[in-house]
Structure formats: C-alpha cells, structure tokens
Image (spheres, helix red, strand yellow):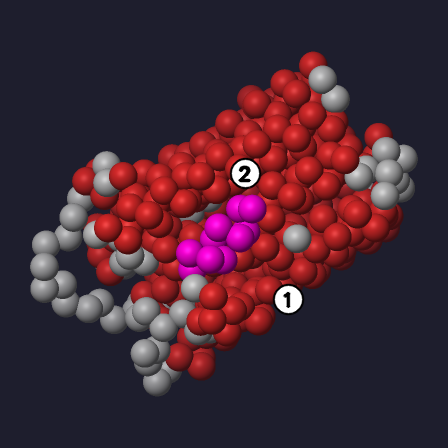
Amino acid sequence: MPHRSWPLQSFNFAFFFFAYYAYIGAFTPYAGLFFAERGMGAAEIGILMSLMQVTRIFGPNLWGWAADRTQRRVVVLGVTAVAALIVFGGMFVCKGFAQFFLVMLLLNTATSAQGPLSEALMLSEMQGDLTHYGRLRLWGSVGFIVAVAFGGKLLDWQGVAAMPWLSWALLGMVLVAALRLRESPHRQVQHSVPSVRALLLRPEVAAFFTSTFMMVAAHSALYVFYSLYLAQAGYSKMVIGLMWSWGVIAEIAFFYFQAPLFRRLGVKTLMLASLALAVGRFLLIGLGAQSLLLLLFAQLLHAATFAAHHSASVLTMQRWFAGALQARGQALYISISYGLGGSFGGMLLSAFWSDVDGRAVFFAAAVLAALGWVAAFLSFRWQARQ
C-alpha cells in the first residue's frame, strides 16, 4: 500500500505530469512553425523533429540505467530537468541548421527520460497498488490539451516567436515539479535481480515488446498523417483541432474510470481489446473520411487504443520490471515502443503516403495493430505457462 505521505506525493506526481505533458503540448505542435520562421527548409525541419523520436531510442535507457544503478531516481530526474532548461536557452540564439540540430539532440536526450522516470517513481511509491494510477496519469493529458489550446491562442496573438518563451516557462515548471518529488523507500531485495538482457530473451517478454512496438508503429498514422489526411478530405483547421481534442478528452475519461474496469475485466482482456479496437479504428478512418460521425467515433476509440493500452502495458511490465529494474523497464518500454516503433511506423507509413494514398496509410496501420494483437496473445499465452 502507498505510504501515509501519499496524498502530498500524489499531488506532486499529478503536478509533474501536468507540467511535463504541457511542455510537450506547447512545443511539439508548433516547433515546426518556429523552425520555418528561422529559415529552415522542409527537409531540415523533418530532420530536427525526427530527433524527438530518435532520442527516445537511447535517451530513456541511458537515464534509466543511471537511476536504477544509483537508486536516486529523483536526483537523476532533477538533472534531466536542469539540463533541459539550460539547453533550451539555445533556441533563442541559434543560427542555422547545425546549431538547432545540436540543441534538439541534447534537449530531447534529456526530456525523453522524464516520462519513464516519473512513472517509475510513481509505480515504486504505489508498491503494487495501482488503483490511483489512471487518476494521476490523466493530468498529463489535461496538461497537453490545455497547452495546445493556450499555445494556439498565444501564437495567434503574439506570433510564433512566443513559442520558445512558453515552452521554456513550462520546462521551468517541470523543474519545480521534479524538485517537489521525493525518493520512494527502497524495498530490500531477497533474491537476485535478473539481468535486463535475460528478461528480454524470455519469449513472453519479447512478444510483449513486439506487441507494443507494433501498436505504436500503427499509431504513427495518427501522429504523422491524421491532420494532413483530414485536411485533404476538406475539413477545416478548427474541425481538425476539435477532433484531436475529442480524442484526448476520451483518453482522460478512461484514465479517470479505469480502476474498476481493470479489476473487473483484467489486464489481458483490456490489452487484447485495445489492440482489436485499434484495428477497427484505423479501418474506420481509412474508409470513413467523408463521414464526420464515423471519424468522431473513431477518435472516441482513442480511450482504448492509447489510454487502455498504455495502462495495460504498464501493469503487464510489473511482472518483470519492478523494484531495482523499475526505471529501466519503463525506459525500455519508451525506447522500444515509441523510439523504435514510432520511427519504424513513420518511415513505413510515409512510403504508403507517398506511393499510394492517405487511405492506404490507415489500412497499413490496421495491419500493424493486428500483428500487435497476435504478439500480445502469444505473450499472455506464454505467461500463463510460467
């Protein structure tokens, strides 16, 4: 059970998630516009933005190893927050692609670890009782949607030059939030801790990460091409923005109400259901671009394909990556799923976008999600044999 200081610590986690994902919401949607104003071409902007995915491959593992090795996760999280705040200052003075490349590389190497490190801290604090996980994690979604909406209004008013000031201020809030967290008490380990390599070689673990890899690769269709797809179908920017907001609202609702669902249905059922619904969601988007009603329903499924899948993944990992391996487990999840999976999905689906059409992107995403379902089914089957 969580400790008696849990109410204050839970507020601190909620504050951190809000600040961190608010920074993501303020920076990610508008950074491309900022780079364009600074004279970067389309290819250069693509490279700069891709660093957010590339650094997820190695950044979380680097910081996760340091956190688990030293058992001072709050200190490591604070170091990444200070580093990000300092490095981001380069955005105000950079001139030319090479300087922006260096800043983006260092910045995202630091920030890529903040999500998994904060979740590892919270999971350790909960000590296996994940009843409150969703209601804390939802504050990240709230922070994201607030920052996207406020950032858009601010940029309309002050111009895109205001983006770095807003993002920098939010990174300052991330640092304040990190400083409020405290280390979770370390439980004494009565048995030897398996190596990460040995765990990854176990078939049920390999199948689990294959499944999350495929799921995030499939979602690259949304993160990279959804807005372009809707624009091609003739929807206005306002409608496109509302569609994204509707998806995030559905995500927040699931996080808030997820505890009784997990107790009643179980992790396996919700994981497999989220992957099956992802297949349906991407098919609906590919087939129903001209129907606003179908698109609204497809966005409502974000509650399953992101929120339910993410929580089920975190709960599943607790079987293998807990205690001394907590931070590295969360880091591996981000690196394999969002780093490798996101990069693979972006490259693969770009080929469909260029060589076929927008619908083919979402049909291919449905196939990737179906492969993810197969891998998850095998993982749970092999887990049951243990």
User: Circle 1 — which element?
Assistant: helix
Figure quadrant of residue 57: top left
Please name whichever residue, 364 or 93, is drawn nearer the observer in this view of the structure. Answer: 364
- x and y percentages locating residue 294 in the rendered image: 79, 47
Amino acid type, label 2: Ala
Q: Residue furthest top?
A: 355
Q: Is residue 39 visible?
A: no
Q: Which residue is mark 2?
A: 369
Task: Describe the element under mark 2 as helix, strand or loop.
Answer: helix
> Could you tell me which residue is drawn at 83 percent across and 50 percent down?
293
Answer left or right for 381 relative to 334.
Answer: left
Mark 1 vs mark 2, CA separation in Å:
23 Å
Looking at the picture, which amino acid does disc 1 mark? Ala
Query: Residue, x 62% and y 57% (percent of image)?
Result: 303
Q: Position of residue 37 (x, y in %)?
A: 76, 30
Q: Which residues are magenta?
A: 267-276
Q: Look at the image and say whether residue 268 sits in the magenta stretch.
A: yes
Determine contact: label 1, label 2, CB under 8 Å: no
Q: Which of labels 1 and 2 is toward the front?
A: 2
- From the viewer's side, name the closer residue of 163 and 262: 262
- In front of the other: 114 or 385: 385
Q: Nearer the viewer, residue 54 or 371?
A: 371
Q: State yes or no: residue 70 in magenta.
A: no
Locate residue 29, reporting x and y percent.
69, 42
Looking at the picture, does residue 219 appear above or below residue 245?
above
> Which numbered circle lies on residue 253?
1
Indicate the position of residue 246 as horizontal and vertical percent values. 74, 56
Callout 1 crowding tier (Cα within 10 Å): few <14, some 14–19, many ≥20: some
Q: Magenta span: helix, strand or loop, mainly?
A: helix
Furthest residue to the left?
Answer: 191
Q: Is residue 96 above or below residue 142?
A: above
